[in-house]
Image (tube, rainbow, N blue to C red):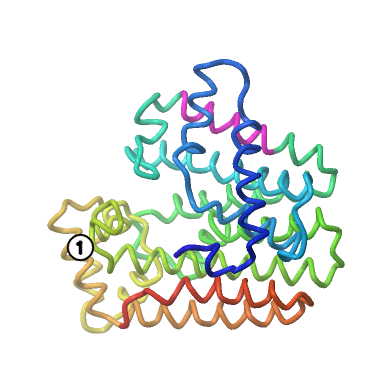
Amino acid sequence: MNPFERLDLPVVESDLARLEGLLAESVIFGDDYLDQVTTHLIYAGGKRLRPLLAVASATGGARAASSNDLLGGVALELMHLASLYHDDVMDEAEVRRNVDSVNARYGNLIAIVAGDYLMARSAAIAADLGTDVAGLLARTLAWLTRGQVSEVRTSFSVERTEKDYYEAIEGKTASLMSSSCRVGAMTAHLDADQTEALAEFGRCFGMIYQLRDDILDLTATNNQLGKPAGQDLAEGVYNLPTLFALRDARVGDELRSVLGAALDDEARERARKLVVATDGIGETMLAAKSFMAQAHESLAVVPHAPLRAGFGSLIESLLEDLPAY
């Protein structure tokens, strides 16, 4: 997915090029070692979806972004990057964005401290943008933490519920997407109705984004994923297709007997095939389409037609390349 092609707002693409320099500048401290650590994932690239949502929400592609619009996007991206530093320590990840993860290169302690530093810089930028934006970032961090705790609390649990699952992904993924749209509306001083509509669009975008990721974890090839298919199963993160499969009358009991502990490659592939053999992926697609309908409903409040069309196309692209089940 090329988000700029789907958004089709050239001014926003130009704004994101400007933001890229601000992103690195915002974390450079003047210490060569620390600067290498804090810019490691920034220079590794990424889609920059959160800044894109922030800037597009602020400008609609109708004008160049102001410095505050850009800084709002920077604050959200830094919070996202900080969460990646911490997640990779928890997951013992070795690769992120096709480069060594920070923990693999510099060690867990440095990765944790550097993640804390990125979070602090995010908070400082938010504070400079005003108390409302600072409050938003604080609430977003609380949602992130809640989502992470929910996921850890239910890891390896075959009794995990859909409520548990949605609580985790709304915190870990959707909260940042929603806050990205909201901060753009705030820096642009949009009215309350537009602000809430854009924030709801961002929430739905984040939910679909994670549902898509969970489907791909089970159906994409190892080369497409950059990790073994079914890795969530091996790590005890039972996503929505797996929860549906556990209730399947034909394979649910067998799947339950395989899960509940860390899996070797053979057991992981067995579990993956069991999930794929059920309606779990199809049911997950239906859930994603429900969030899609909510997203389009929220966009109806947005008065700027090019932004409505761009955001509508962007969110639809999330489901277009998924396999049919």
Which residue occupies 41% across, 28% down? 108
Task: Give the quarter of the figure containing the C terminus.
Answer: bottom left
Count of number-bearing discs: 1
Which residue occupies 27% across, 69% down? 219
**For the residue marked with disc 1, what is the amino acid?**
Val
Is residue 135 something one can see in this rendering?
A: no
| Observer-nearest of 294 and 63 | 63
- The chief SS type of the magenta part is helix
| Observer-nearest of 263 and 273 | 273
Which residue occupies 67% across, 33% down? 121
**What residue did someone put label 1 on?**
258
Q: Which residues are magenta?
A: 110-122
Side of 110 relative to 31 (left or right): left
Look at the image and say whether residue 116 sits in the magenta stretch: yes
Q: Is residue 47 above or below residue 247?
A: above
Residue 152 in percent (x, y) is at 44, 50
Task: Give the quarter of the figure containing the N terminus.
Answer: bottom left
Residue 271 found in image quarter: bottom left
